[in-house]
């Protein structure tokens, strides 16, 4: 798994896997609430639909394309199905407003950060197996994401100072 070829393939799938992970985390937070509320029927329905989606898409996409991106799309789609099912019910039960413009800014920040990190990992000086090669893209990604959100007004300066523990 430590070969350059595997790392290159993984880099292309990373944004899809990141989005799938975000949906996975969100659904499990809501699932915890559903468990406390004893609404295990919805929990079961969402998980069953996600499982059917994952198995079906794996059989189709992975068999057709035989690429890691197909598996990443499968994961993203299965968590999206689960999220849609629980969101439709959750919005009726627990009406929580979602600030769509801020979510859009966060997605834009994520896209730019992903592009910057992808470019950095292609830089010859960072194509080594060193701590610097691992830390520089990660730290740069955090800085780029934070600065973009700050410039777009989605991250107040006070929050940015707290994040980096800079005195006022």
Image (cartoon, rainbow, N blue to C red):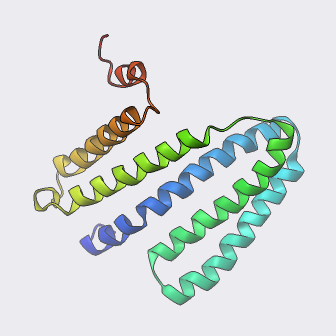
Direction bottom: furthest residue: 64
Residue 23 in the image, given as x and y percentages of width and height = 61, 52
Residue 53 in the image, given as x and y percentages of width and height = 70, 71
Asked if residue 73 is positioned above or below residue 166 in the image, the reply reads below
Direction left: furthest residue: 125
Direction top: furthest residue: 168
The C terminus: image quadrant: top left
Horizontal side of 117 relative to 93 (left or right) equals left
Asked if residue 97 is positioned above or below residue 104 in the image, the reply reads above
Residue 38 in the image, given as x and y percentages of width and height = 88, 40
Horizontal side of 45 relative to 32 (left or right) equals right
The N terminus: image quadrant: bottom left
Q: Nearer the viewer, residue 101 or 119?
A: 101
Residue 40 in the image, given as x and y percentages of width and height = 86, 48
State the residue at coordinates (17%, 46%): 132
State the residue at coordinates (81%, 36%): 94
Q: Nearer the viewer, residue 159 or 129?
A: 159
């Amino acid at each position: 798994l430590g070969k350059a070829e595997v790392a290159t393939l993984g880099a292309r799938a990373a944004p899809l896997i990141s989005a799938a992970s975000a949906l996975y985390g969100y659904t499990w937070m809501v699932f915890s609430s559903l468990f406390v509320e004893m609404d295990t029927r919805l929990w079961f329905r969402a998980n069953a639909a996600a499982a059917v989606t994952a198995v079906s898409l794996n059989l189709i996409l992975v068999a057709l394309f035989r690429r890691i991106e197909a598996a990443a799309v499968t994961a993203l789609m299965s968590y999206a199905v689960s999220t849609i099912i629980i969101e439709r019910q959750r919005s009726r039960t627990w009406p929580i407003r979602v600030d769509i413009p801020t979510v859009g800014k966060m997605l834009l920040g994520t896209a730019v950060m992903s592009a910057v990190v992808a470019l950095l990992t292609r830089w010859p000086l960072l194509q080594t197996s060193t701590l610097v090669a691992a830390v520089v893209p990660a730290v740069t990604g955090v800085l780029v994401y934070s600065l973009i959100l700050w410039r777009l007004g989605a991250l107040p300066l006070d929050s940015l100072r707290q994040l980096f523990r800079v005195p006022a």
